[in-house]
Amino acid sequence: MIYNIAMVSDYFYPQPGGIESHMYQLAQQLINLGHHVIIITHAYGDRTGIRYLTNGLKAYYIPAFVLYRNTTFPALWAQFPILRQILIRENIHIVHGHASLSSLCLECILHARTMGLRTVFTDHSLFGFADAGSILGNKLLKFCLSDIGHVICVSHTCKENTVLRASLDPSNVSVIPNAVLSPNFMPDPSKASKEFITIVVISRLYANKGADLLSVVIPKICQRHPMVRFIVAGSGPKEIDLEQMRERYQLQERVQLLGSVRHEDVRNLMVKGQIYLHPTLTEAFGTVLVEAASCGLLVVTTKVGGIPEVLPPHMTVYSQPSENDLVDAVSEAIEIVQENRFHINPRRKIDPYEFHRQIEKMYQWSDVAQRTLRVYNSIDTETLHEPLVNRLTRYYGCGTWAGKLFILVIIVDCLLYYILEWLYPRSQIDSAPMWPRKTTKSNSASYTND
């Protein structure tokens, strides 16, 4: 069956990141398999309206108030009219939301179920249970996923976290990891310095990504290893801390701060180093680790979240998320690189091209797309048009008081949907033309819209 799929999230290009890359690459693979895919996200500056990306991928940048870290304000019903217009206009069968902190994603999933559409949610992150923000976020996630068709997580650790946070049935949650476009991350050892050992860091500079730990670790490593140089790419509120650290320890010649970089420039940056450092405090998967290993770098990372599931042991040096452990782990990696450079009985062999070949076999977007399609096919279509009382029963189980509030929200959502159906009938909404798909018949190229 050919599906019309809407992928929804607050996080998409031009903002760089793992979720953004995941959505784009998965959409491209599904398009190559003959499906129609659109992206729904919020406007980024002057990037508003409809934009066409590679291979006919259509992105809707809808106007919305951005609250924090490119997440829209949770307005609940404010976006329903425009989301309904898009879903009807594109004849969408499946709404696939990404990221549990994306208000736009959760709202669209809620409205899609009211419209009788299939829904899928992919969680890319780990969150706690104790602080006020986590408690509120988990309750909202439980509400929005109470009536979900299926849930996908990017690692087994992420699955355990999501099942507990949203009180989900584990049998309704699948694990499909991220992948990497291997040809875009070919190793090139000739680009790395022969005089120095270069450590590359590419990350959003936030506290949860270990930016505070990085500010403390870099001076100690530079003091212990005079031949080491750092290249740090990324932006965020902790960027000023790194700049102050560099000034305080006079490391201008040894620490290069590049700020935000485009994803297409990541490979050219990685091949300048021999070691990739990832000092994160929490991570569900870590796509950048796969990209670094594909480029032939030895990866030093903290042993948290789903990271131990990502790479085989011979590609990584693990550390606890603490200052001294991370310095020791980086020092061990530096010794391994030197042993390979001077052929002094290395404790482990670093072959960049062998790393790349192994990653190419392990992580492929075509495999991710096929497994995602199996998830789409597994959704029970009998529940799409079930009586409203069945939906309300599931929401009622979200809590003594919260359940009653959620039932009220769903009733209002249904009433608003019927009002919109009356004010703006489907018959008056023009269907969007499908992007022509290239097919081959009798050794000649033709185009079709079927």
Image: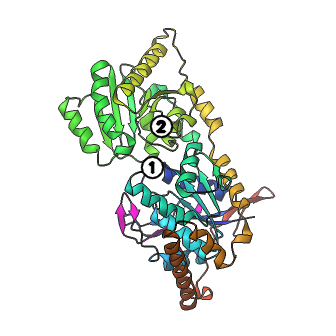
Quadrant of the image occupied by residue 214: top left
Badge number at residue 220: none
Q: Is residue 51 visible?
A: no
- Helix, strand or loop under label 2: loop
Q: Which residue is mark 1?
A: 128
The residue carrying pointer 2 sits among few (fewer than 14), some (14 to 19) or many (20 or more) residues within 10 Å by Cα, namely some
Residue 156 in percent (x, y) is at 59, 43
In this view, the residue in front, 324 or 256, is 324
Q: Which residue is mark 2?
A: 304
Residue 336 placement, left or right of 195: right
Is 190 rendered above or below residue 406?
Answer: above
Residue found 44% across the figure and 34% down from its top = 270
Residue 361, position in %: x, y?
Answer: 65, 36
Nearest to the eye among marks 1 and 2: give it: 1
The foreground one among 354 and 152 is 152
Q: Amino acid at mark 1?
A: Gly
Q: Residue at x 52, y 29 (%)?
A: 296
Identity of the residue drawn at 57% across and 91% down: 422
Residue 334 percent location from the top left of the image: 41, 20
Left of 390 or right of it: where is 216? Answer: left
Its colouring scheme is rainbow
326 is higher (above) or lower (below) than 390: above
11 versus 186 height, above or below: below
The image quadrant of residue 269 is top left
Residue 232 visible? The answer is: yes
Which residue type does callout 2 highlight? Val
Start-end of magenta stretch: 55-74
Q: CA distance from mark 1 to mark 2?
A: 13 Å
